[in-house]
Image (cartoon, rainbow, N blue to C red):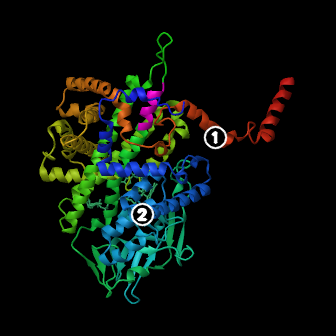
Amino acid sequence: MEGVDHLAHERNKSEFDVDAMKIVWAGSPHAFDVSDRISKLVASDPGFRKDNRSTLSRKELFKNTLRKAAYAWKTIVDLRLSEEEAAKLRFYVDEPAFTDLHWGMFIPAIKGQGTEEQQQKWLPLAYKMQIIGCYAQTELGHGSNVQGLETTATFDSQTDEFIIHSPTLTSSKWWPGGLGKVATHAIAYARLIVGGREHGVHGFIVQLRSLEDHSPLLGITVGDIGMKFGNGAYNTMDNGVLQFDHVLDVYSIAFASIAVMLWVSQVTCEGKYKQSDVPRQLVYGTMVYVRQTIVADASCALSRAVCIATRYSAVRRQFGSQNGGPETQVIDYKTQQSRLFPLLASAYAFRFIGEWLKWLYADVTQRLQANDFSTLPEAHACTAGLKSLTTTATADGIEECRKLCGGHGYLCSSGLPELFAVYVPACTYEGDNTVLLLQVARFLMKTVSQLGSRLSSKKPVGTIAYMTRVEHLMQCRCGVQRGFAELSADLVEAAVAHCQLIVVSKFIEKLQQEIPGKGVKQQLEVLCNIYALFLLHKHQGDFLSTGCITPKHAALANDELRSLYSQVRPNAIALVDAFNYTDHYLGSILGCYDGNVYPKLYEAAWKDPLNESVVPDGYHLYIRPLLKQEIRTARL
Ligand SMILES: CCCCCCCC/C=C\C/C=C/C(=O)SCCNC(=O)CCNC(=O)[C@H](O)C(C)(C)COP(=O)(O)OP(=O)(O)OC[C@H]1O[C@@H](n2cnc3c(N)ncnc32)[C@H](O)[C@@H]1OP(=O)(O)O
Ligand SMILES: Cc1cc2nc3c(=O)[nH]c(=O)nc-3n(C[C@H](O)[C@H](O)[C@H](O)COP(=O)(O)OP(=O)(O)OC[C@H]3O[C@@H](n4cnc5c(N)ncnc54)[C@H](O)[C@@H]3O)c2cc1C
């Protein structure tokens, strides 16, 4: 029945202040207020409906995305939303679109790497969306290997021009979001050539399309790369292909001292290349920025899937009826708990590691401005490793949540297939997860060689086992006289262990803070212990081989996990309510707040276009002749 809360009995079991936990999840009372207000604004506006995406063709889907993006921008302008509120609105509109790259990469790249004069010229235009930008780094032939990019930017001091060119098919830019049909400008990464000498990969602001009629400029060939994984999903995004045919990059010439897209290097009007004494890797700064945002995004995506699977697990009953009584809620099965509750704990763990990484990034950015590069290696290793760890765990976790919902999890109306299809490229974009773990492994090798065996003593006591595991895994590999390449698969495992150590230790540090609200800290302690003990159980071979735990410890840890699952059980619904997601944002009948699943599933089925007629289109052409033929055969 509509209006009845079918999960009220679950909510009444809660042993903590859910409203206080909502503040913890949001990060602060202010953040909660903005999220709550904007999510409800989006949910209540039919202009942002998204329940029809799976029935649209690619062109209809894309045009609808353009409509929504324009509608979102009009809403932002009409309501005079702040930058924070506008970002939240785009988040709750929940549709991959060119605006992600405009706001999420193009603007940050100019802010992070542009010179003062470039920022003064481009940021006002970008903030008003009078230009639309994309981040064009990856090429058909190279994505992971940035130093292998082939696009060239040749400075001709005779004519005072930069010529951007795609010398080969494989140098075609390929994948950049927003590039295919919308972006008017790109930050294009190219090999800088001055006076016949090459100076590595740098970023250039290049105009792609006319601001009058949107036609591609002379020398620019641009289009979409085609359908991607899933039906709706990321096909709302125009990931593009771009070729330069000796394009004059007029904008680099607009400035007295011709500045490539970086404050770390300059080409003067006399055609002299000036590399300042900063690490060349600062050219990768935008990727580092986005990787840290992706960690926070992982907690959002995983918490959405866990919210759906937890609410449905409380609604779904299967087997176990005693004397005609109700069947057992599947959330009460120990196997369901052992699959679901570690994911619930991971969602909270990733939330807090995302908060810490945001602090780390802000700190390293501040240091860079003072030419202090001391923490840059650790910031790179942390953003790379945690992006890899959290996106892999989240992609796997969303799929596990689909399976936790049985057959109905496979329906589009569950929200889980779309969530999975949109999320999984996060394991690839902003750096293939294995390639990024290799960077962490390289950092660990260097650290071990500099510090000896102890990687760091700066960890809370509760993580001694985790720290010993990393050191052991590194010693087993570093001690062996074989090259990095030969040991890379093993070193990647050590890199994962190192990142798990960071997540556990930051969760423990979070619990050492003042956390208001009845029972809130206690619930977080349970989730922290579940996260730590679940990983210890999953990787117990590593922990046993270090000798820092015995088989008896491993058995005790498993017993403790079961006890912890029992402690979470009465609070599970309240813990996912604390995410404060609207039904609109969740986009899931299985995860609807009131738990009134079956009537909604049944109603939704009849809305499918296939049910517009009781006799399907094609019956008379194909089925009837078949049936008639069978009947004739049957008479023989
Ligand atoms: C509104 C919010 C929305 C936000 C947007 C959401 C996401 C939108 C969805 C999709 C967008 C997707 C965009 C993209 O995918 S952009 C393209 C991403 N591409 C990559 O990530 C490429 C990955 N490859 C690399 O980063 C590099 O090629 C590399 C690091 C793998 C290798 O680089 P290379 O120059 O060859 O360096 P070395 O390995 O030789 O290392 C040299 C040295 O430099 C250090 N180092 C490497 N990278 C960095 C860095 N980023 N920062 C600092 N230091 C770095 C490395 O550690 C070595 O140090 P050393 O050992 O001391 O010498
Ligand atoms: C949805 C989506 C959106 C994207 N958006 C953008 C964008 O806006 N702008 C942009 O510039 N790019 C974008 N990209 C491209 C993305 O950044 C690259 O695909 C990503 O960096 C991976 O690079 P690759 O495709 O070359 O993978 P590859 O490196 O070719 O990976 C293939 C395999 O090789 C392995 N491998 C590669 N190198 C090594 C090594 N040294 N050691 C061991 N194994 C290795 C990888 O682990 C992987 O298993 C996007 C991609 C996707 C899927």
- What secondary structure prevails in the magenta region? helix
Residue occupying the point 24% across, 27% down:
557
Q: Badge 1, how many Cα within 10 Å: few under 14, some, many 20+?
A: few
Q: x and y percent of residue 399 in the render?
A: 45, 38
Q: Which residues are magenta?
A: 307-316
Residue occupying the point 43% across, 79% down:
249
Most foreground residue, 254 or 477? 254
Task: Tell me which image quadrant ligand 1 sits in.
Answer: bottom left
Specify which label sits upstream in the sequence, 1 or 2.
2
Residue placed farthest to the top in the image?
323
Q: Which residue is mark 1?
A: 607
Quadrant that contains the N terminus: top right
Most foreground residue, 487 or 593? 593
* Foreground: disc 1 or disc 2: 2
Camera sees residue 89: yes
- Compared to residue 112, the image places residue 321 above or below, namely above
Q: Which residue is mark 2?
A: 80
- Compared to residue 104, the image places residue 569 above or below, namely above
Q: CA distance from mark 1 to mark 2?
A: 37 Å
Q: x and y percent of residue 201 in the render?
A: 35, 70
